[in-house]
Image (cartoon, grey):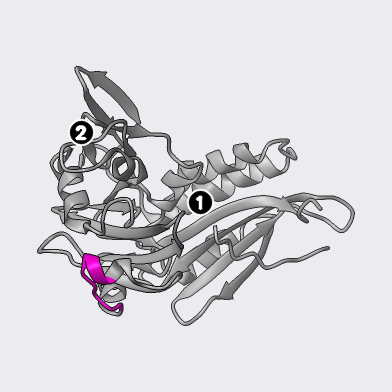
Amino acid sequence: MRTFSLIALGAAVAIHSGILTSALAADLNVTAVAPLKRAPPDLLDKAKGIGPRFKFFSAPQGLSEACAASVDAHVNEGDFVDYPIARTLEEFRSVVASKVQLNAREAERTSVHTGFALAGKDHVSGATCVNLKAAPEERGSCTGTISGTGYIIVYGFDPVLCRYDNLAVAESLETRLFVASRNDTEPELDCATKLEGFVTDIDDLLVKSPRSIIDVFKVLNRHFPLHGCSADVASRIMKKSRYFRSMQPNGPKKYVFSLSSATASSRGVAVSFGLTDSGDSSLPWAMWWPPFP
């Protein structure tokens, strides 16, 4: 039988008089005020623990049209940042602190593909940035955070179009996003219960040879993210799956669990997720295996 190791790199909404309300079950209630609006989620946002996404549909006071169009934001629970090399706010601030902080004039003169940081203040973190293209198509990318009680707003913007003003972008978002406290009427299931349900559902689906990978994503979104999981408990439960393939370390602080319905003679579905030493899942993913040429 063909084996594999896969490490993936990879709500109710109501609109009334320009105000948009987004609710995640047992999570945060987020209200956005125009010209901020709800944006479509990515396929595995829920499974990854990423909250509702928002975009400006026109420029708010203080931002140009071009800058506003480049801004995107999402609201996560707790201090989860989901930046590629930083899961928590503390880790993200460390990433920002490792970069050279520049003012607008200095940042304008940086070389292409040079990383730098823009200033933050108090609960608004500094932004980690890079200039990606040279003039006349000069463009870049920045990521920053706004921390609140029980939530964090993660946002991105083009530093060139926004004149290297991280605080102006943060203020435009903060004054238009209102986050209520967690709704505890639906307590989160413990890790073992969620994983047991996941193994049952994924096995029931894979045995039917699903025709669409979206059906697998739906199962991941139903059971992830995970919190408070120990590697031993996760290993014991995941090995109950008829499609279990491996549990492998990925660095000193993470294990990657892999499932696959592929055989030596037929293509199937590969499913993977990481589990950190803090007990949180990361990067749940699914794909056809072997990949299509």
Q: Earlier in the sequence, mark 2 or mark 1?
A: 2
Residue 92 visible, this orientation? no
| Mark carried by residue 31 | 2
**Label 2 to label 1, Cα distance in Å?**
34 Å
Q: Residue at x 17, y 37 (%)?
A: 176
Callout 2, which amino acid? Answer: Thr
Q: From the viewer's perspective, is 281 left or right of 216?
A: left
- Asked if residue 105 lies in the magenta stretch, the reply is yes
Instruction: Residue 196: give its label.
Output: 1
Q: Which residues are magenta?
A: 99-106
Rendered image quadrant of residue 210: top right
Answer with the quarter of the image where residue 57 lies: top left
**Residue that sits furthest to the top in the current view:** 17
Kindly give the residue lying farthest to the front in the view shown. 136
Tell which of 40 and 50 is nearer to you: 40
Relative to 116, is 288 on the left or the right? right
In the depicted structure, whether residue 145 falls above or below residue 54: below
Residue 254 drawn at (x, y percent):
47, 73
Of the 4 image quadrants, the one containing the N terminus is bottom right
